[in-house]
Image (tube, coloured by chain):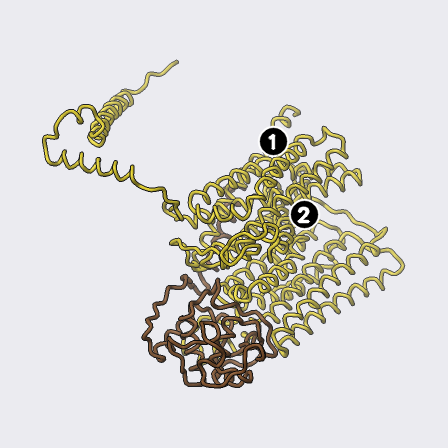
Chain colours: A brown, B yellow
């Protein structure tokens, strides 16, 4: 029995489509939920801030889309393992807090040598972290190779404080300081 | 003799009538109870039971509530069963597929008609008209789906649609005017075939393309603004409509879509020819549709070859707009989508090459190139393999330990861009060689410098391939910013080789000895390949439409207007591919109907003539 051409072609279209759909089922499946509002009570301890900061770093802050921790080689963006130690000395006159704050609020003001600018401003959409959430992220970054010191009351140049306000290091005025990044 | 209806039918009709009347009475009673507070009988009579009183009170309360309710603008409304996102997704994709076809066919119909007018070969004119016959019904489907999409957006996403209107309202009037002009030019071009002076008809075809391109550019501004907004402040207020139009991805999408539409339109037209070829009763019909399929496929491949380069530009602009968005696309949630895309593009190249190789069977003298095919196949398969190799895979802890990391110690190297850029460039070069061999099958150069010319062509190919491979390997030893720049010499060498070899070939084949091409004498498998190409093209467009839109993730307008609906999450690739598959099948059902309509046109005339 000869199968009508129209039927043959319909079967072929269904078979091809089904094959591609099966390829789609074979790859890893991940449903990405929109970021949730994170409740940050004012009496959080620094350790609690580190834990929450890590959650934000890996989720809502989408930091891990670009940054790695503990990888080497030809990286597209700086690896953040031990960044707390580097942050203290990256720019003369800047504390680690100043450095982290500027890199999150004005990320392209300073770019680490060997890398291209491209980090989004973290307190603005699409990431849009609040000042409190950014403090928690800074706490987490300080824990990468250092001892975190920030609290929910910590002030820096972008939340009503000044340069050197939170790190205990005498800082140069912002206008004289070199630009920061990473 | 007239037959009486059977007794059982009369009985059934009687029962149905009784049931209908009973149902109508019941409905009236229920309706009267529900509206009791309005019924004169109910308002004059005192409710006799607490239940009746309660009904009256409830109705009163509801009435009061309705009267006092303030006007509130809805943010979202729900579409039944499948939800709002899927409904808009399917209709938008169907609209886009038809629009791509409707915009593409006039481009090559105009070019083919022009070739016919210049050469005086009537076959080209007939072929161009055959393509245009597919347009009328497709245009109506495109418009209907576009209207459907607009209504769905207004009904289901009113706040978002209002926002887009606030930004783009100055573009609406030009869009509508261009749409009217498109309809006018299209129908005059189609119905005026053979009835208008040639220059006038060609001018209409040209204007049809100009207007169609204008429409696409305006619509592209709306959708690219959603992904890479510009011309608005941080709060979303409009600063400049022109800047909103001329956002980061507008021009790359315009160019990418124009090329992709041509490739896609060619493939659908070739599928139509394949369908007619397989149904053909005579050798003459087979010859005609074989030729039509060849031209359609030629157009499709001609569009396919530069498409990855346009894709590079688009991706580059996405990175320029937002590194985060770029990395989400290539290294984040959507990275696996590009493995699926690799399978699709690999198949497109494989089917296109296979069709060309089978096509050599209809040309006398093509036998001399047959031994080369197996090498081309090996190269294509290797490139396909590299392109489809993922950088990392979902692994168990034991597997990760065995591999010494998340990536395979050897295959992991094939998952990075250096390898993939190399693979796709060699794939393009190989397909071009297949095309060149096909072109050479029926011709033998007779110019005095033929041997040197052939050697020069070979040297150009070898140099281009060596350049691509050199930068591919070198990319493993340099930093990211340098490596990204390597795609320029890779792409440049391939494009340059194709242009140089084509120019050389034109001069080489001047006055060449030609052999007969036996149109219609081709293996039927080739026609199924044309159908497979069309399905794969359509599926690829569906998938890439998803990634372009999905990249916004939980934003209607990226970074400006957030999606707060129940559909704000990004679905799994498995779900997305199911929606794409259903859309593709609906599209083929509809385009099959259009093929059927096109095959009907002219039938009456043929019957009368016979």
Left or right of A74 in this view: B455: right
| Residue B425, position as x, y percentages in the image | 66, 65
> Answer yes or no: do the residues labelled 1 and 2 have beta carbons within 8 Å?
no
Residue B70's place in the image compared with A120, above or below, is above
Q: Which residue is mark 2?
A: B294
Q: Is residue B286 visible?
A: yes
Q: Quadrant of the C terminus of chain B?
A: top right
Q: Disc 1 or disc 2, which is closer to the eye?
A: 1
Q: Callout 2: 10 Å neighbours few (<14), some, many (20+)?
A: many
Q: Earlier in the sequence, mark 1 or mark 2?
A: 2
Residue corresponding to mark 1: B601
Q: Secondary structure at mark 1?
A: loop
Q: Residue at x 60, y 46 (%)?
A: B218
Q: Chain of mark 2?
A: B
Chain label for disc 1: B
Q: Residue B323 location, x and y as percent?
A: 55, 67
Q: Residue at horizontal 30%, vertical 20%? A: B6
Q: Which mark is residue B508?
A: none
Q: Quadrant of residue B173?
A: top right
């Amino acid at each position: 029995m000869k199968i009508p051409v129209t039927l043959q072609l319909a079967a072929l279209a269904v078979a091809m489509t089904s094959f591609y759909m099966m390829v789609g089922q074979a790859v890893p499946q991940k449903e990405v939920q929109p970021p949730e509002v994170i409740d940050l009570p004012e009496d959080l301890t620094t350790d609690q801030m580190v834990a929450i900061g890590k959650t934000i770093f890996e989720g809502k802050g989408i930091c891990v889309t670009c940054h790695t921790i503990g990888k080497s080689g030809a990286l597209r963006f700086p690896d953040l393992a031990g960044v707390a130690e580097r942050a203290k000395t990256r720019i003369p006159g800047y504390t680690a807090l100043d450095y982290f704050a500027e890199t999150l609020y004005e990320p392209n003001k300073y770019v680490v040598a060997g890398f291209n600018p491209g980090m989004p401003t973290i307190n603005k959409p699409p990431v849009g972290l609040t000042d409190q959430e950014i403090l928690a992220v800074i706490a987490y970054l300080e824990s990468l190779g250092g001892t975190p010191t920030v609290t929910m009351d910590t002030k820096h140049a972008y939340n009503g404080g000044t340069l050197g306000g939170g790190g205990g290091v005498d800082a140069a005025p912002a206008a004289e300081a070199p630009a920061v990044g990473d | 003799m007239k037959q009486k209806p059977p007794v059982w039918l009369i009985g059934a009709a009687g029962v149905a009538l009784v049931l209908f009347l009973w149902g109508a009475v019941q409905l009236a009673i229920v309706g009267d109870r529900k509206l009791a507070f309005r019924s004169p009988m109910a308002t004059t009579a005192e409710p006799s039971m607490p239940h009746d009183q309660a009904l009256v009170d409830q109705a009163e309360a509801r009435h009061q509530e309705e009267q006092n309710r303030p006007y509130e603008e809805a943010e979202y409304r729900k579409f039944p069963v499948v939800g709002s996102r899927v409904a808009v997704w399917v209709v938008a994709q169907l609209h886009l597929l038809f629009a791509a076809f409707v915009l593409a066919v006039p481009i090559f119909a105009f070019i083919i008609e022009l070739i016919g007018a210049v050469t005086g070969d009537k076959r080209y004119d007939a072929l161009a008209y055959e393509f245009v016959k597919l347009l009328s019904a497709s245009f109506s489907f495109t418009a209907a789906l576009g209207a459907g999409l607009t209504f769905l957006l207004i009904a289901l996403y009113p706040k978002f649609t209002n926002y887009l209107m606030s930004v783009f309202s100055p573009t609406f009037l030009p869009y509508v005017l261009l749409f009217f002009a498109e309809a006018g030019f299209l129908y005059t071009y189609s119905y005026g075939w053979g009835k208008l002076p040639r220059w006038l008809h060609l001018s209409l075809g040209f204007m049809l393309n100009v207007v169609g391109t204008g429409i696409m550019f305006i619509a592209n501004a709306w959708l690219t603004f959603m992904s890479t907004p510009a011309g608005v402040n941080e709060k979303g207020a409009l600063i400049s409509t022109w800047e909103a139009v001329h956002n980061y991805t507008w021009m790359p999408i315009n160019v990418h879509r124009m090329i992709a539409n041509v490739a896609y339109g060619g493939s659908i037209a070739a599928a139509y020819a394949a369908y007619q070829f397989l149904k053909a009763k005579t050798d003459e019909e087979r010859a005609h549709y074989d030729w039509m399929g060849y031209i359609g496929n030629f157009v499709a491949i001609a569009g396919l070859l530069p498409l990855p380069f346009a894709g590079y530009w688009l991706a580059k602009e996405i990175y320029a707009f937002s590194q985060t968005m770029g990395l989400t696309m290539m290294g984040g949630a959507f990275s696996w989508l590009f493995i699926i895309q690799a399978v699709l593009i690999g198949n497109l190249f494989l089917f296109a090459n296979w069709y060309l190789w089978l096509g050599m069977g209809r040309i006398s003298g093509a036998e001399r190139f047959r031994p080369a095919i197996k090498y081309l196949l090996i190269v294509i398969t290797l490139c396909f393999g590299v392109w489809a190799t993922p950088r990392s895979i979902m692994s168990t802890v034991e597997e990760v330990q065995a591999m010494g990391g998340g990536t395979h110690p050897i295959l992991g190297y094939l998952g990075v861009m250096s390898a993939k850029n190399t693979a796709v460039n060699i794939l393009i070069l190989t397909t071009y060689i297949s095309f060149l061999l096909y072109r050479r099958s029926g011709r033998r150069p007779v110019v005095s410098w033929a041997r040197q010319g052939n050697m020069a062509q070979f040297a150009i190919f070898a140099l281009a391939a060596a350049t691509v491979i050199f930068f591919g390997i070198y990319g493993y030893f340099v930093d990211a910013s340098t490596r990204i720049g390597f795609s320029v010499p890779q792409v440049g060498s391939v494009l340059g080789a194709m242009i140089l070899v084509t120019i050389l070939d034109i001069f080489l084949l001047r006055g060449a000895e030609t052999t007969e091409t036996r149109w219609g004498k081709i293996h039927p498998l080739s026609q199924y390949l044309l159908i497979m190409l069309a399905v794969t093209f359509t599926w690829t467009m569906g998938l890439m439409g998803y990634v372009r839109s999905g990249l916004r993730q939980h934003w209607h307008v990226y970074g400006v207007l957030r999606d707060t609906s129940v559909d704000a999450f990004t679905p799994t690739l498995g779900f997305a591919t199911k929606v794409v598959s259903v859309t593709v099948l609906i599209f083929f059902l509809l385009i099959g109907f259009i093929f059927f309509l096109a095959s009907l046109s002219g039938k009456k005339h043929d019957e009368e003539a016979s």
